[in-house]
Image (spheres, grey):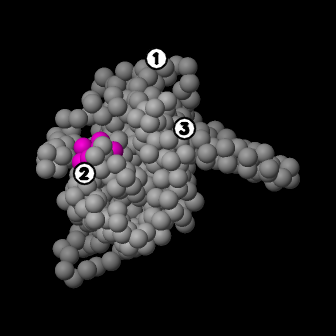
Amino acid sequence: MNSQQAMRWMISISLIVALFLTIVPLPPDWDDWRPQWVTLLLIFWCLTLPERIGVFWGFGMGLMLDMFTSGLLGQQALSLSLVAYVTITLHARVRLFPRWQQSFFVWMLLLAERLLTLWILGATGQPMPTLTYWLPTLVGLMLWPWFSRSLSWLGQHTGAL
Amino acid sequence: MIAVMLALGLMVADHRFHHLDVARSTVEVVMYPMQYAASLPAQWVRSAQGQLDHENQLRRTNDDLQHENLVLKGRLQQFESLRAENMRLRDLLGSSFDVGERVLIAEILSIDLDPYRQQVIINKGTNSGVFVGQPVLDAQAVMGQVIRTNALSSTVLLITDANHALPVEDNRNGLRTIAAGKGPSQELELLYIPKNADIRVGDLMVTSGMDERFPPGYPVARVKTVRQDPDNPFTTVIAEPTARLDRSREVLLVWSLNLNSDSPATPPALAADAVAPAPAGNH
C-alpha cells in the first residue's frame, strides 16, 4: 500500500471513528463533557495536510455529522467549513507554535464553532442552552496535545504521513 | 465562500421547506447500520448487567412484575365492560368514536443525537408501515411523533422539543389548551390559559385528539406549577411529561383504527408483530 492510499484510509477511518464517538451514548453526567471530536479531527487534518484537506472537506464532514445526529441539515456544515477555512489560512503560522500555544488556537476555533452553532440554534427558535454548552471546548483544549500527538504517531507508523 | 452559501441554503431548505426529506431519508438508510453499530456498546453493557444480576434480585423483579400483571389484568376485566357500556352510550348519543388503536413495539437506538434537539431514532421504518406524523407512546404516556422515516428506521420528535406542540385537555374538567415543548429542560408549557381558568397543580393533561393526529385520551403531562405573571395576559403553567422520555427503551407506535372515516390502511407487517391493546409496564 503506497502512502497516498494509506493516507486516504487513515482519513476516512479516523472520520468514522470520530462520528462514532460523537453519538456513542455516555452516562448522562459525562454527556456535557463530550469533546467536539469531528471538529478536532478536522483541525488536525487541516494543519497536517493543508494541501489536501480544505473547506469542502469541512463542509462534507459537517454534513455527515448533521445526518448522523439528525440535526438541522447544514448547521455543522457551515461551522466546520468556516473552521477549515480559518485553519487553512493560518496553518503555516500555527504549525510552528509549541503545542500548548497551538492548543489555545484550537480552543478559539472550537469556541467559534460552538458560537456559530449557538446562532443557528437561536435562529431556528431553539431555547438558549445553559453554560454547560461551552464545556466541550475546554475538554478539547485539554485534549488537543494528546490528540494531535497520537494521531501523528499513528500516521507515521502506518506510513500515511 | 461557496461552502458557506451552500450550507446556508441547505439550512433554509431543510428548516423552512422540507425539500430535502427524500434525500435525507435515502442517506439515512445508509447511515442506519453505522448508528446501529454505535448503539451496540450500550446494549452490551445492558446485557452484561443482566447476566450479572443477582438471582434474588431477578426473583424479586419477577414477583413484582407478576403482581403488577395481576393488578392490571384485574383492572382490564372492568375495562372491557366499561368500554362496551361507553360504546352503547355513545351510540345512543349518536356520536362517533375511534374503536381503537393498533400498536407496534419499536426500540430506541442507544445513541446520543444533537443534544439541543429532543429527538430519538427508533428501529422501525417504512418497511413496518411507519409513517410521518405517527404518534409514539411509551408505557406511561405520549412521547412524540415520527418526523422522518426511511426503510429501516425513523426519527421521532419528542413532545419536549421547542418545535413541538400538541393540543391537550385537562382530564379533570376538559379545559382545552396546547402543550408546547421547552427544549432541554424536559418541561412543557401550557399556552393560552386565561387568568381565571380552573387549573391546579397536579392536574393530568391528556391528548384531546383535536389535531386528528394523536388519539384522544392518552396522558401527556402533569401540571407542575401555576403562576400568575403580571406582565403576561395568560396564566403561566408548566407541566411535566408523564412519559419517561429519557429512560424508556421501548416505544409503541400507534395506528388509529377509525370506523367512521377511512383510516390509514393497516400495513401488512402489522399482522405479524402487532399487539393490541397496549401492554403496560414492560420495564
Q: What residue type is labelled 3?
A: Ala
At x 30%, y 50%, the residue is A50
Q: Which chain carries label 2?
A: A
Q: Report which residue position mark 2 lands on.
A: A81
Q: What residue type is labelled 2?
A: Ser
Residue A57 counted in the magenta span:
yes
Q: Distance between the residues labelled 2 and 3?
A: 27 Å
Q: What residue type is labelled 1?
A: Pro
- At mark 3, the secondary structure is helix
Same-subunit check for callouts 3 and 1 = yes
Q: Position of residue B13 (x, y in %)?
A: 17, 42
Q: Can residue B80 be seen in this view?
A: yes
- Res. A30 image quadrant: bottom right
Q: Distance between the residues labelled 3 and 1?
A: 28 Å
Q: Position of residue B129 (x, y in %)?
A: 42, 25
Q: Residue B37 carries which label?
A: 3
Same-subunit check for callouts 2 and 3 = no
Q: Report which residue position mark 1 lands on.
A: B268
The tally of labels here is 3
Q: Please, which residue is most extreme toward the bottom here?
A: B230
Q: Please, which residue is most extreme toward the right here?
A: B56
On screen, residue A102 above or below A89: below
Which is closer to the viewer, label 3 or label 1?
3
